[in-house]
Amino acid sequence: MTTLKHPLLYCNGDSYSNPNYDKSLKNKTYDYIVGKKLNAYNINSAVNGSCNRRIIRTTVADLIHQRELNPKQRIIALIGLSYDLRSEYWNNDFLKPNEDNKSLFESDFVSYQFANNNNWFRDLLNNKTINNYKFREGKNYSKKFDDIKNKSRAFFYNPQAERINLYCDLVMFKELMDKLKVEFLVFNSASYDEDIASDTTFDLFRNEIYKDERFIDLDKFSFCKFAFDNNLEPIDSKDNPLIGHPSSIAHERFAKDILIPKLYQS
């Protein structure tokens, strides 16, 4: 058993939280800035293309593991949520990328986004192939069944259903973090495109989340929107800055203006 003398700062998310996304972000992502302020030891399990299910599942596994290793250590988690459009499937023995910041608990789940453009619904109605965005291809990859899966996913996709399940996961996540005595902040990395209508189940979970200030306005706020509102040019997608990856300057501002003050007030 190892007991760290400094706080353990844990981060998880998708490419918006990944220090390996671009060489300009090495040791300059928001978690690194917060960790430096707190004199903390950093663990970053963010992986490009992650869906919310992957982010929450690996966070839960990682933090249970870290609490077992360090029963009395102060642990702080910063969790950046991803897009509703992303999901995952199981692919035995997928070809794992060489990523230094991967969780120990990835298993054979593969994150994917069933559409990579805004015309996916029109393509679906016209019986065209929906071009998805895969982040890992395994040994069992099949173009035929990949296309069938994408069309089925698109046909049954509903952002309200996705958000209900996400918020349910977050309610349970909150309870587990309190049990493990883990401090945390959860926020959207990218902005949601769709408004969710009032629904009995959605409202119940949403209201439970909004009682807790450790969730940073999941309806209106996002890391990318913060960068956009502060005129901080992204690394890429400069023609659509609301989805572009924030620069190291934006990461630093986000850490200093939002995350650090939130941690000190909680």
Image: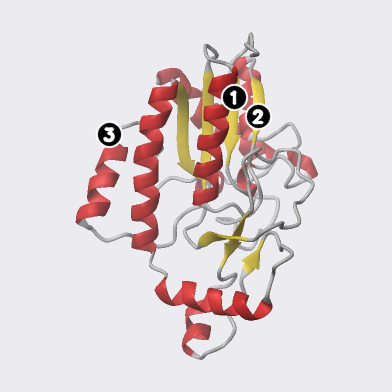
Looking at the rendered structure, the kind of residue marked 3 is Lys
Report how far apart the C-alphas of labels 3 and 1 lie in the structure.
Answer: 24 Å
For mark 3, what is the residue?
211
Q: What residue sits right under mark 1 in the picture?
A: 9
Q: As displayed, is residue 262 above or below residue 147?
A: above
First along the sequence among labels 3 and 1: 1
**Could you classify mark 1 by the number of other residues whose Cα lies within 10 Å: few (under 14), some (14-19), or many (20 or more)?**
many
User: Of discs 3 and 2, which sits in the foreground?
Assistant: 2
Kind of element beneath mark 3:
loop
Q: Nearer the viewer, residue 87 or 225?
A: 87
Which quadrant: the N terminus? top right
Q: Is residue 65 above or below residue 40?
A: below
Q: Earlier in the sequence, mark 3 or mark 2?
A: 2
What amino acid type should be assigned to the residue bearing mark 2?
Ile
Residue at the far left: name it.
200
Task: Please state the horizontal and vertical placement of residue 128, each as a whole percent of the image.
Answer: 57, 88
Residue at the image position 76 percent from the left and 56 percent from the top: 95
Of residues 204 and 247, the one drawn nearer to the viewer in this rendering: 204
Residue type at mark 1? Answer: Leu
Query: Mark 1–mark 2 contact, CB under 8 Å?
Result: yes
